[in-house]
Image (spheres, rainbow, N blue to C red):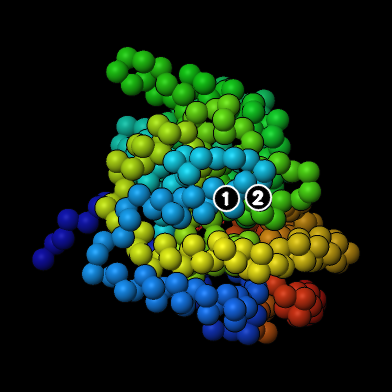
Amino acid sequence: MTLPLRPDFIGEEPYGAPQLDVPIVLNTNENPYAPHDVVVNEIAARVGEAAKGLNRYPDRELMALRQGLADYLALESNVDVPATQLWAANGSNEIMLQILQAFSGPDRVVMTFTPSYSMYSEYARNVYAKFVAIPRATDFRINIDAVPATFAQHRPSVVLIASPNNPTGTALDQADLRAVLEASVGAGPEVNGQVTDSIVVVDEAYGEFRRDGVPSSLELLAEYPNLVVSRMMSKAFGAAGLRLGYMAASQTIIDMVRIVRLPYHLSAISQAAALAALEHRDSLMEQVGAIRADRDALAQTLRGMGLEVAASDANFIMFGTFENRHAVWQKLLDQGILIREVGPEGWLRVSIGTPHENEAFIAGLKEAMT
Ligand SMILES: *Cc1c(COP(=O)(O)O)cnc(C)c1O
């Protein structure tokens, strides 16, 4: 029997970092601190409540959760976003897919600046869009001067920018984001004979780890109806297992995404657990400040070892360069330390762990480099 495989899927492997059972896991940028018992019990209680109504479909408009997210963003970023301009899904991965389903497709271009999150090309592939990757400068920032010409050439319907960027850790300056947003005006594809503006998605997966004084892109939301800011609870929030991502955007964008979302995509269990987690954000995010300080200290240590370190606003560090990075990665793994072999040739990425894990990593790396 011959199945009608999509030609572009033949030989493809599913995306994913290795999930290995080793003592020190520093490869997927999770928050290394598990929730406290009080929070665990509260989540369990709220999920128990939700279970009583499991014979019914959940609120498909997620209004309580969207309000909880609005309250959180007002505190975290000092920006008031109405709950109706927020939307949530199963991880920011699903948010991104929904955005591309709503605004991209076979005759459209999705653009990003690489190196960046490697799922972007896969989202584009899955909706049959053309994916265009523009190389970043040597310091991994976006070459802003070249953006207008690049947009004019490719006419992207959606531009994806991770800030802080994964795997490099690079934050996008607000001035640079403004320049991108200005360039996006009139840069989109024609729709019914009309020129459009590209949608600009800032993926702030690591937003909460940004250094002091680095503003969130949320501050520009009211000015630019084509801006989307994506956030999630997986990394800083310490709830990767919850699978909760969300975005803030103009009403038109949210309404288009509501067209493509599957009915009841976010389970009552997820909604209840996420609301409970939001209420306990102080506890779940207690160590974000410490992780940021540990990141800066680890960067110093790596530089002291003669390594190159990319400036990071996230909870990971990209460092190098190695003649044979795979050998270094393997030697660390042999010592029970799992990091990520990702980024430009010669570089490796390590997530910030607990102080004990960070020390073990440094010791292991010294051993691997001898
Ligand atoms: C980890 C990561 C994601 C995935 O987020 P989920 O909310 O867990 O789906 C998205 N974007 C970037 C840049 C990431 O590093």
Dividing the picture into quarters, in which one does residue 156 lie?
A: top left
| Badge 1 amino acid | Asp
Residue that carries the numbered disc 1 in the rendered image: 71
Residue that carries the numbered disc 2 in the rendered image: 75
In the rendered image, residue 281, in percent from the top left (x then y), is placed at 62, 63
Residue 192 to residue 160: above or below:
above
Point 77% across, 66% down: residue? 290
| Badge 2 amino acid | Leu
* SS at circle 1: helix
Left or right, residue 366 beside residue 159: right
Dividing the picture into quarters, in which one does residue 173 lie?
A: top right
Residue 100 shows up from this direction:
no
Residue 302 to residue 148: above or below:
below
Give the crowd class for mark 2: few <14, some 14-19, many >=20 residues within 10 Å. few
Residue 338 to residue 159: above or below:
below
Which of 79/167 is in front? 79
* Distance (Cα) linking label 2 and label 1: 7 Å
In the rendered image, residue 79, in percent from the top left (x then y), is placed at 63, 40
Tag 2 near tag 1, CB within 8 Å? yes
Residue 21 shows up from this direction:
yes
Point 46% across, 77% down: residue? 45
Which of 192/52 is in front? 52
